[in-house]
Amino acid sequence: MPIIKRHKTKYPGVYFIQGSAIGTGKPERIYYIIYRKDGRLIEEKAGRQFQDDMTAAKAAQMRTKRIQKDELSNKEQRIVTKKEKQLESDRWTISNLWKEYKKGKPNIKGLTQDENRFENYIEPEFGNKEPKDLFPLDVDRLRIRLQKTKSPGTVKNVLELLRRIIHYGEKKNLCPHLNFTIEMPRVNNIKTEDLTPKQLKKLLEAINQDPDIQTANLMKMALFTGMRRGELFRLEWKDIDFDKRFIHIRDPKGGSDQTIPLNDSAYQILKHHPKSKKSDFIFPGRKGKQRVDIRRHVNKIKESAGIPKDFRALHGLRHVYASMLASSGQVDMYTLQKLLTHKSPLMTQRYAHLRDESLKQASNLAGSIINETISKKKKKVVNMKDVKQI
């Protein structure tokens, strides 16, 4: 090994060696200090000329502070830092509880969305706090701030995640019970999105004209099958039974796996849909991984078709699918519940009012049949009297 030359400075116990600047490779001085502390001879790095803005004078000041025990040595600082990290890891903060929660629930649904909620809203506020350090006012402030820019549903999801993390810690005896209730905002989930026949026609035209076949076919699948966004993102080719014409839905929102029919329209879409050589997903995301978002692409198509901004491009098409079936009068609520993979019939009842018109038509038809029957009987009676008179 080549001998590294030490260059003395005018300051006692301070020297430098000639090195190369990181990134540029230019010549750079790297300063070192030598001193005794508690009878031990210590030699350690003070810093680099450019990266740390170190000079011989600054190195001499550092040396003096360490001799006088006003400052820890590099080794002592590393020991302290290690202890602090260990103490931090031993504390069941919200961040540590979240890590433990993910370990204990590796197959949790909606993990990507929960990760975003935690990193963007929960961690900056409460990440380094333990549940016992939380106060109702802290959570109230977070809720009020989020309500200014986020929908009630988003705010509820964030607070529900916070509550879920803490409850998990309580259940595993990692933290004490929270001594107050986290209040949730009221959310109206009865919103049912729909499109007029004219709007639907324009949307389909925009979808067919868009060059992005992945987005176009994904939107068509949402319309023709009523599948949820996450279910379409998770859909793999192995989930499609082209022979028996069924779609296997893994991890649906309603609970256990479900199977729905692969209707003719969906069959034609998937039959001609391009397969990725790098992915098993039908609608893969970046690098062949599971897709997590498609808003930018679907919003572009939505704008092109002149669809209202508050219409959710994928979930809205699920509503359109359900609304058309419900209003047709040819599909009962139980069948619709199964097609939508709703866990409870109460969730399907939001579409019940759409059957009113078909029910009115059926009722009117019954009245017409009865009146027609009565009319025929009267005619027969009249005819018999006329025969007797003759």
Image: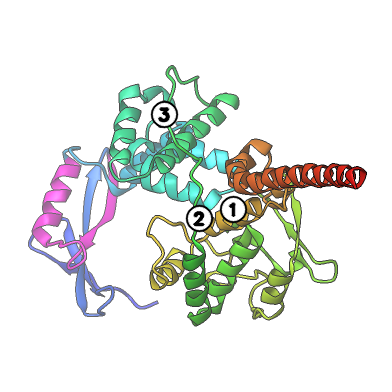
Residue 314 lies left or right of residue 330; in this view the side is left
105 vs 231: above or below = above
Q: Secondary structure at mark 1?
A: helix
- The residues tagged by marks 3 and 1 sit, at their Cα atoms, a distance apart of 47 Å
Badge nearest the viewer, 2 or 3: 2
Q: CA distance from mark 2 to mark 3?
A: 45 Å
In the image, 200 versus 46, the foreground residue is: 200
Q: Which residue is mark 1?
A: 323
The coloring applied to the image is: rainbow
Disc 3, SS: loop
The image position of residue 150, as x and y in percent, is 34, 45
The secondary structure type at the circle numbered 2 is: loop
Residues at circles 3 and 1 in contact by the CB criterion of under 8 Å: no
Disc 3 target residue: 130
Q: Which residue is located at x 52 percent, y 60 percent? A: 314
The magenta-colored residue range is 39-67
